[in-house]
Amino acid sequence: MKVDSFNTLILPLKEKLFRHAFSIVRDRAEAEDILQDLLLKLWSRREEWEGISNPEAYCYRAIRNMSLDRLSVASNRKNALPTYEEDEASLIDNESPHIRLVRKEQQELIVHSLSLLPKRQQEVFQLREVEEMSYRQIADTLEISEELVKVSLFRARKKLQELLSGEEMNERSQMGSSRKQNES
Amino acid sequence: MCKEMNRDRIHELLNKYWNCETSLAEEQELRRFFSEEELPEELQRYSPLFSYIREEQAPRLSAEFDQRLQESLRKAEIPVIPHHLLRRTTLTRIAASILLLLGVGVSLYFITRQQNNPQYVERGNEETEVLEQATNALEKLADALRLSEEASRQTLRQINEMEIDWELIDSLNSETTPGETDPYSETDDAGEVSPANDTIQKGVNAGYLESINSEEKI
Protein backbone atom coordinates (compact mmCIF):
# COMPACT_ATOMS: atom_id res chain seq x y z
CA MET A 1 0.00 0.00 0.00
CA LYS A 2 2.75 2.40 0.91
CA VAL A 3 4.70 1.31 -2.13
CA ASP A 4 1.65 2.06 -4.22
CA SER A 5 1.16 5.51 -2.77
CA PHE A 6 4.80 6.24 -3.52
CA ASN A 7 4.24 5.25 -7.12
CA THR A 8 0.88 6.95 -7.59
CA LEU A 9 1.27 10.03 -5.41
CA ILE A 10 4.92 11.00 -5.35
CA LEU A 11 6.51 9.78 -8.55
CA PRO A 12 4.10 11.63 -10.89
CA LEU A 13 5.31 14.85 -9.31
CA LYS A 14 8.90 14.26 -10.30
CA GLU A 15 8.97 16.48 -13.41
CA LYS A 16 7.35 19.38 -11.59
CA LEU A 17 9.58 18.96 -8.59
CA PHE A 18 12.60 18.80 -10.84
CA ARG A 19 11.59 22.04 -12.56
CA HIS A 20 11.10 23.68 -9.21
CA ALA A 21 14.53 22.62 -8.05
CA PHE A 22 15.99 23.74 -11.37
CA SER A 23 14.32 27.14 -11.08
CA ILE A 24 16.25 27.66 -7.87
CA VAL A 25 19.63 26.04 -8.44
CA ARG A 26 19.77 26.67 -12.22
CA ASP A 27 21.69 23.49 -12.85
CA ARG A 28 20.17 20.35 -14.32
CA ALA A 29 22.49 17.82 -12.73
CA GLU A 30 22.19 19.53 -9.36
CA ALA A 31 18.40 19.64 -9.63
CA GLU A 32 18.24 15.94 -10.48
CA ASP A 33 20.50 15.22 -7.56
CA ILE A 34 18.26 17.11 -5.19
CA LEU A 35 15.17 15.38 -6.53
CA GLN A 36 16.75 11.99 -6.06
CA ASP A 37 17.72 12.89 -2.52
CA LEU A 38 14.18 13.96 -1.79
CA LEU A 39 12.63 10.82 -3.24
CA LEU A 40 15.02 8.62 -1.28
CA LYS A 41 14.22 10.51 1.87
CA LEU A 42 10.50 10.18 1.26
CA TRP A 43 10.92 6.50 0.57
CA SER A 44 12.86 5.86 3.75
CA ARG A 45 10.24 7.70 5.78
CA ARG A 46 7.18 6.20 4.14
CA GLU A 47 5.93 5.10 7.56
CA GLU A 48 5.27 8.74 8.39
CA TRP A 49 3.25 9.58 5.32
CA GLU A 50 -0.07 8.99 7.00
CA GLY A 51 0.49 12.22 8.90
CA ILE A 52 0.97 14.36 5.80
CA SER A 53 -2.31 15.90 4.71
CA ASN A 54 -1.16 17.42 1.44
CA PRO A 55 1.68 15.39 -0.10
CA GLU A 56 2.09 17.65 -3.11
CA ALA A 57 2.51 20.80 -1.07
CA TYR A 58 4.75 18.90 1.30
CA CYS A 59 6.97 17.76 -1.56
CA TYR A 60 7.18 21.25 -2.97
CA ARG A 61 8.18 22.69 0.36
CA ALA A 62 10.75 19.95 0.83
CA ILE A 63 12.37 20.36 -2.58
CA ARG A 64 12.34 24.13 -2.21
CA ASN A 65 14.10 23.97 1.12
CA MET A 66 16.61 21.42 -0.11
CA SER A 67 17.32 23.51 -3.21
CA LEU A 68 17.79 26.66 -1.17
CA ASP A 69 20.10 24.78 1.18
CA ARG A 70 22.11 23.48 -1.73
CA LEU A 71 22.26 26.95 -3.20
CA SER A 72 23.56 28.53 -0.02
CA VAL A 73 26.17 25.80 0.36
CA ALA A 74 27.19 26.24 -3.26
CA SER A 75 27.38 30.01 -2.97
CA ASN A 76 29.45 29.66 0.17
CA ARG A 77 31.76 27.32 -1.60
CA LYS A 78 32.09 29.13 -4.87
CA ASN A 79 31.23 32.53 -3.50
CA ALA A 80 29.36 33.20 -6.70
CA LEU A 81 25.72 33.32 -7.68
CA PRO A 82 24.55 30.59 -10.04
CA THR A 83 24.44 31.74 -13.60
CA TYR A 84 21.37 31.42 -15.70
CA GLU A 85 21.88 28.23 -17.63
CA GLU A 86 21.26 28.64 -21.32
CA ASP A 87 18.65 26.32 -22.61
CA GLU A 88 19.97 24.77 -25.78
CA ALA A 89 16.72 23.02 -26.50
CA SER A 90 14.86 26.26 -26.98
CA LEU A 91 11.37 25.78 -28.34
CA ILE A 92 11.80 28.48 -30.94
CA ASP A 93 14.54 27.16 -33.09
CA ASN A 94 13.99 28.46 -36.58
CA GLU A 95 14.91 32.06 -35.84
CA SER A 96 17.53 34.26 -37.23
CA PRO A 97 20.46 34.68 -34.88
CA HIS A 98 19.63 38.35 -34.50
CA ILE A 99 16.05 37.81 -33.38
CA ARG A 100 17.27 35.10 -31.12
CA LEU A 101 19.79 37.42 -29.55
CA VAL A 102 17.21 40.12 -29.02
CA ARG A 103 14.80 37.64 -27.52
CA LYS A 104 17.47 36.33 -25.22
CA GLU A 105 18.25 39.78 -24.02
CA GLN A 106 14.61 40.53 -23.46
CA GLN A 107 14.29 37.39 -21.45
CA GLU A 108 17.34 38.29 -19.44
CA LEU A 109 15.65 41.56 -18.71
CA ILE A 110 12.64 39.68 -17.41
CA VAL A 111 14.81 37.39 -15.31
CA HIS A 112 16.54 40.42 -13.95
CA SER A 113 13.39 42.32 -13.06
CA LEU A 114 11.89 39.20 -11.53
CA SER A 115 14.97 38.85 -9.38
CA LEU A 116 14.39 42.35 -8.07
CA LEU A 117 10.96 41.38 -6.75
CA PRO A 118 10.46 40.40 -3.12
CA LYS A 119 11.16 36.73 -2.50
CA ARG A 120 7.53 35.84 -1.91
CA GLN A 121 6.35 37.45 -5.13
CA GLN A 122 9.03 35.56 -7.03
CA GLU A 123 7.93 32.28 -5.53
CA VAL A 124 4.24 32.86 -6.13
CA PHE A 125 4.96 33.91 -9.71
CA GLN A 126 7.04 30.80 -10.28
CA LEU A 127 4.41 28.44 -8.85
CA ARG A 128 1.58 30.05 -10.77
CA GLU A 129 3.16 30.64 -14.14
CA VAL A 130 5.59 27.80 -14.45
CA GLU A 131 4.08 25.10 -12.22
CA GLU A 132 0.53 26.14 -13.12
CA MET A 133 -0.75 25.78 -9.59
CA SER A 134 -4.10 27.00 -8.33
CA TYR A 135 -4.14 29.75 -5.71
CA ARG A 136 -5.16 27.18 -3.15
CA GLN A 137 -2.20 24.93 -4.00
CA ILE A 138 0.22 27.84 -3.83
CA ALA A 139 -1.20 28.88 -0.48
CA ASP A 140 -0.73 25.33 0.84
CA THR A 141 2.76 25.06 -0.54
CA LEU A 142 4.05 28.35 0.80
CA GLU A 143 1.91 28.11 3.93
CA ILE A 144 0.40 31.54 3.46
CA SER A 145 -3.18 32.70 2.92
CA GLU A 146 -4.83 32.59 -0.49
CA GLU A 147 -5.35 36.33 -0.20
CA LEU A 148 -1.63 36.89 0.17
CA VAL A 149 -1.02 34.66 -2.83
CA LYS A 150 -3.30 36.79 -4.98
CA VAL A 151 -1.80 40.03 -3.76
CA SER A 152 1.73 38.80 -4.38
CA LEU A 153 0.91 37.55 -7.85
CA PHE A 154 -0.89 40.78 -8.68
CA ARG A 155 2.12 42.85 -7.71
CA ALA A 156 4.52 40.64 -9.64
CA ARG A 157 2.40 40.78 -12.78
CA LYS A 158 1.90 44.51 -12.46
CA LYS A 159 5.64 44.97 -12.30
CA LEU A 160 6.10 42.95 -15.48
CA GLN A 161 3.28 44.78 -17.19
CA GLU A 162 4.93 48.09 -16.39
CA LEU A 163 8.19 46.74 -17.67
CA LEU A 164 6.71 45.39 -20.92
CA SER A 165 4.15 48.09 -21.66
CA GLY A 166 6.53 50.96 -21.11
CA GLU A 167 8.26 52.36 -24.15
CA GLU A 168 11.57 52.08 -22.39
CA MET A 169 11.49 48.33 -22.81
CA ASN A 170 13.28 48.44 -26.14
CA GLU A 171 15.63 51.18 -25.08
CA ARG A 172 16.65 49.28 -22.02
CA SER A 173 17.32 46.12 -23.90
CA GLN A 174 19.30 48.16 -26.40
CA MET A 175 21.27 49.69 -23.58
CA GLY A 176 21.85 46.29 -22.14
CA SER A 177 23.18 44.95 -25.39
CA SER A 178 25.43 47.93 -26.01
CA ARG A 179 26.80 47.61 -22.52
CA LYS A 180 27.52 44.00 -23.16
CA GLN A 181 29.26 44.80 -26.38
CA ASN A 182 31.38 47.34 -24.59
CA GLU A 183 32.35 44.83 -22.03
CA SER A 184 33.36 42.20 -24.52
CA MET B 1 -11.70 37.59 -39.66
CA CYS B 2 -10.86 34.77 -37.34
CA LYS B 3 -7.58 36.46 -36.52
CA GLU B 4 -9.33 39.71 -35.60
CA MET B 5 -11.60 37.87 -33.18
CA ASN B 6 -8.69 36.07 -31.76
CA ARG B 7 -6.84 39.32 -31.27
CA ASP B 8 -9.73 40.86 -29.35
CA ARG B 9 -9.94 37.78 -27.26
CA ILE B 10 -6.23 37.96 -26.45
CA HIS B 11 -6.49 41.62 -25.49
CA GLU B 12 -9.33 40.77 -23.19
CA LEU B 13 -7.45 37.85 -21.70
CA LEU B 14 -4.35 39.97 -21.22
CA ASN B 15 -6.33 42.56 -19.32
CA LYS B 16 -7.73 39.85 -17.12
CA TYR B 17 -4.25 38.40 -16.78
CA TRP B 18 -2.70 41.61 -15.44
CA ASN B 19 -5.53 41.85 -12.93
CA CYS B 20 -5.12 38.23 -11.86
CA GLU B 21 -8.58 37.31 -13.02
CA THR B 22 -7.61 34.58 -15.49
CA SER B 23 -8.09 30.90 -14.82
CA LEU B 24 -5.28 28.44 -15.29
CA ALA B 25 -6.85 27.35 -18.59
CA GLU B 26 -6.99 30.92 -19.85
CA GLU B 27 -3.38 31.46 -18.89
CA GLN B 28 -2.51 28.38 -20.87
CA GLU B 29 -4.39 29.82 -23.83
CA LEU B 30 -2.35 32.99 -23.57
CA ARG B 31 0.91 31.11 -23.52
CA ARG B 32 -0.17 29.09 -26.52
CA PHE B 33 -1.10 32.22 -28.41
CA PHE B 34 2.21 33.90 -27.69
CA SER B 35 4.15 30.89 -28.81
CA GLU B 36 2.88 31.43 -32.35
CA GLU B 37 5.29 32.72 -34.90
CA GLU B 38 3.43 35.77 -36.11
CA LEU B 39 2.17 38.09 -33.46
CA PRO B 40 0.23 41.30 -33.99
CA GLU B 41 2.50 44.32 -33.73
CA GLU B 42 1.05 45.69 -30.50
CA LEU B 43 1.27 42.33 -28.75
CA GLN B 44 4.86 41.54 -29.58
CA ARG B 45 6.18 43.40 -26.60
CA TYR B 46 4.60 40.84 -24.29
CA SER B 47 6.03 37.83 -25.98
CA PRO B 48 9.30 37.76 -23.94
CA LEU B 49 7.33 37.13 -20.77
CA PHE B 50 5.49 34.17 -22.19
CA SER B 51 8.48 32.73 -23.91
CA TYR B 52 10.36 33.10 -20.64
CA ILE B 53 7.63 31.11 -18.91
CA ARG B 54 7.64 28.49 -21.66
CA GLU B 55 11.34 28.05 -21.32
CA GLU B 56 11.04 27.78 -17.58
CA GLN B 57 8.58 24.96 -18.17
CA ALA B 58 10.82 23.25 -20.66
CA PRO B 59 13.39 21.48 -18.48
CA ARG B 60 12.77 17.75 -18.37
CA LEU B 61 14.41 15.10 -16.33
CA SER B 62 17.09 13.24 -18.19
CA ALA B 63 16.22 9.83 -19.59
CA GLU B 64 18.52 8.09 -17.13
CA PHE B 65 16.94 9.62 -14.08
CA ASP B 66 14.40 6.85 -13.49
CA GLN B 67 17.03 4.17 -13.80
CA ARG B 68 19.34 5.95 -11.41
CA LEU B 69 16.51 6.47 -8.97
CA GLN B 70 15.57 2.81 -9.05
CA GLU B 71 19.17 1.82 -8.44
CA SER B 72 19.57 4.14 -5.51
CA LEU B 73 16.26 3.01 -4.06
CA ARG B 74 17.39 -0.58 -4.34
CA LYS B 75 20.68 0.29 -2.74
CA ALA B 76 19.05 2.29 0.00
CA GLU B 77 16.47 -0.18 1.15
CA ILE B 78 15.68 -2.85 -1.45
CA PRO B 79 12.21 -1.69 -2.46
CA VAL B 80 11.03 -5.15 -3.50
CA ILE B 81 11.28 -6.55 -0.01
CA PRO B 82 9.07 -4.18 1.99
CA HIS B 83 6.02 -6.37 1.33
CA HIS B 84 7.82 -9.28 2.90
CA LEU B 85 9.10 -7.11 5.69
CA LEU B 86 5.65 -5.80 6.34
CA ARG B 87 4.21 -9.29 6.47
CA ARG B 88 7.04 -10.47 8.64
CA THR B 89 6.63 -7.63 11.07
CA THR B 90 2.91 -8.26 11.42
CA LEU B 91 3.64 -11.96 11.90
CA THR B 92 6.25 -11.24 14.52
CA ARG B 93 3.85 -8.81 16.17
CA ILE B 94 1.19 -11.49 16.38
CA ALA B 95 3.70 -14.01 17.68
CA ALA B 96 4.96 -11.55 20.25
CA SER B 97 1.49 -10.76 21.50
CA ILE B 98 0.64 -14.46 21.77
CA LEU B 99 3.82 -15.03 23.76
CA LEU B 100 3.02 -12.09 25.97
CA LEU B 101 -0.50 -13.35 26.62
CA LEU B 102 0.86 -16.83 27.38
CA GLY B 103 3.40 -15.38 29.78
CA VAL B 104 0.82 -13.31 31.58
CA GLY B 105 -1.53 -16.28 31.76
CA VAL B 106 1.08 -18.62 33.20
CA SER B 107 2.30 -16.11 35.74
CA LEU B 108 -1.27 -15.30 36.79
CA TYR B 109 -1.89 -19.01 37.25
CA PHE B 110 1.12 -19.41 39.51
CA ILE B 111 0.42 -16.23 41.45
CA THR B 112 -3.14 -17.29 42.25
CA ARG B 113 -1.93 -20.73 43.23
CA GLN B 114 0.65 -19.26 45.55
CA GLN B 115 -1.98 -17.06 47.11
CA ASN B 116 -4.37 -19.98 47.49
CA ASN B 117 -1.97 -22.38 49.17
CA PRO B 118 -1.28 -20.53 52.44
CA GLN B 119 -4.94 -19.72 52.87
CA TYR B 120 -5.67 -23.40 52.54
CA VAL B 121 -2.98 -24.30 55.10
CA GLU B 122 -4.06 -21.71 57.63
CA ARG B 123 -7.71 -22.48 57.50
CA GLY B 124 -7.87 -26.27 57.23
CA ASN B 125 -4.63 -27.72 58.54
CA GLU B 126 -3.79 -26.48 62.03
CA GLU B 127 -6.20 -23.78 62.94
CA THR B 128 -5.93 -24.68 66.59
CA GLU B 129 -2.15 -24.74 66.42
CA VAL B 130 -2.05 -21.23 65.04
CA LEU B 131 -4.45 -20.12 67.73
CA GLU B 132 -2.27 -21.75 70.37
CA GLN B 133 0.79 -20.04 69.00
CA ALA B 134 -0.99 -16.71 69.10
CA THR B 135 -2.27 -17.15 72.65
CA ASN B 136 1.17 -18.36 73.69
CA ALA B 137 2.74 -15.22 72.36
CA LEU B 138 0.10 -13.09 74.00
CA GLU B 139 0.62 -14.87 77.30
CA LYS B 140 4.35 -14.29 77.11
CA LEU B 141 3.73 -10.63 76.46
CA ALA B 142 1.30 -10.48 79.38
CA ASP B 143 3.89 -12.19 81.63
CA ALA B 144 6.53 -9.70 80.63
CA LEU B 145 4.20 -6.81 81.32
CA ARG B 146 3.29 -8.26 84.69
CA LEU B 147 6.91 -8.71 85.62
CA SER B 148 7.80 -5.17 84.70
CA GLU B 149 4.80 -3.86 86.67
CA GLU B 150 5.90 -5.82 89.72
CA ALA B 151 9.42 -4.53 89.42
CA SER B 152 8.32 -0.91 89.22
CA ARG B 153 5.97 -1.39 92.19
CA GLN B 154 8.83 -2.83 94.21
CA THR B 155 11.13 0.06 93.46
CA LEU B 156 8.37 2.49 94.41
CA ARG B 157 7.96 0.65 97.71
CA GLN B 158 11.70 0.75 98.37
CA ILE B 159 11.78 4.49 97.68
CA ASN B 160 8.95 4.98 100.17
CA GLU B 161 10.79 2.89 102.78
CA MET B 162 13.81 5.12 102.49
CA GLU B 163 11.96 7.94 104.33
CA ILE B 164 13.63 10.72 102.43
CA ASP B 165 13.31 14.25 103.67
CA TRP B 166 11.94 15.82 100.48
CA GLU B 167 12.07 19.35 101.83
CA LEU B 168 15.75 19.00 102.52
CA ILE B 169 16.39 17.83 98.95
CA ASP B 170 14.51 20.82 97.60
CA SER B 171 16.60 23.20 99.70
CA LEU B 172 19.76 21.61 98.27
CA ASN B 173 18.98 23.24 94.94
CA SER B 174 19.79 26.68 96.37
CA GLU B 175 22.73 26.01 98.73
CA THR B 176 25.14 23.10 98.86
CA THR B 177 26.77 22.19 102.10
CA PRO B 178 29.37 19.45 102.08
CA GLY B 179 27.64 17.26 104.65
CA GLU B 180 24.27 17.30 103.04
CA THR B 181 25.20 17.14 99.29
CA ASP B 182 24.41 13.48 99.06
CA PRO B 183 20.67 12.87 99.53
CA TYR B 184 21.46 9.23 100.16
CA SER B 185 23.93 10.20 102.95
CA GLU B 186 22.08 8.11 105.53
CA THR B 187 23.98 5.12 104.12
CA ASP B 188 26.57 3.43 106.38
CA ASP B 189 29.80 5.28 105.67
CA ALA B 190 28.34 8.77 105.28
CA GLY B 191 30.15 10.03 108.40
CA GLU B 192 33.58 9.08 107.24
CA VAL B 193 33.32 10.71 103.87
CA SER B 194 33.34 14.34 104.87
CA PRO B 195 36.56 14.37 107.04
CA ALA B 196 38.41 12.55 104.31
CA ASN B 197 37.21 15.16 101.84
CA ASP B 198 38.45 17.89 104.14
CA THR B 199 41.96 16.52 104.41
CA ILE B 200 42.19 16.11 100.67
CA GLN B 201 41.06 19.68 100.22
CA LYS B 202 43.70 20.90 102.65
CA GLY B 203 46.43 18.90 100.95
CA VAL B 204 45.52 20.32 97.58
CA ASN B 205 45.46 23.84 98.95
CA ALA B 206 48.86 23.38 100.58
CA GLY B 207 50.36 22.02 97.38
CA TYR B 208 48.93 24.93 95.43
CA LEU B 209 50.36 27.48 97.91
CA GLU B 210 53.71 25.79 97.83
CA SER B 211 53.85 25.94 94.08
CA ILE B 212 52.99 29.63 94.17
CA ASN B 213 55.69 30.23 96.74
CA SER B 214 58.25 28.36 94.70
CA GLU B 215 57.36 30.45 91.66
CA GLU B 216 57.83 33.64 93.66
CA LYS B 217 61.22 32.47 94.79
CA ILE B 218 62.34 31.96 91.23
Image (spheres, rainbow, N blue to C red):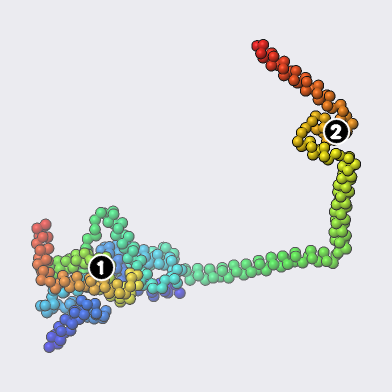
In the image, what residue occupies the spot 37% across and 69% down?
A: A58
Give the total number of marks visible in the rendering.
2
Say whether residue B81 is left or right of residue B117: left
Amino acid type of the residue tagged 1 in the rendering: Gln
Q: Is residue A184 left or right of residue A61?
A: left
Kind of residue at disc 2? Ser
Quadrant including the N terminus of chain A: bottom left
The subunit letter for the residue under badge 1 reads A
Residue placed at 72% from the left, 17% from the top?
A: B209
What residue is shown at x 19% (from left), y 64% (from top)?
A: A112
Place residue A59 in its image quadrant.
bottom left
* Residue at 87% over, 45% down: B156
Where residue A93 sits, quadrant-wise, is: bottom left
Please tell me which residue lies in front, A157 or A61: A157
Residue B185: image tag: 2
Res A29 seen here: no
Image quarter hosting the C terminus of chain A: bottom left
Q: Which residue is mark 1?
A: A122
User: Dot 2 surroundings within 10 Å: few (below 14), some, or many (20 or more)?
Assistant: few
Along the viewing direction, whichever of A155 and B197 lies nearer the viewer: B197
Crowd rating for badge 1 (residues with CA inside 10 Å; few <14, some 14–19, many 20+)? some
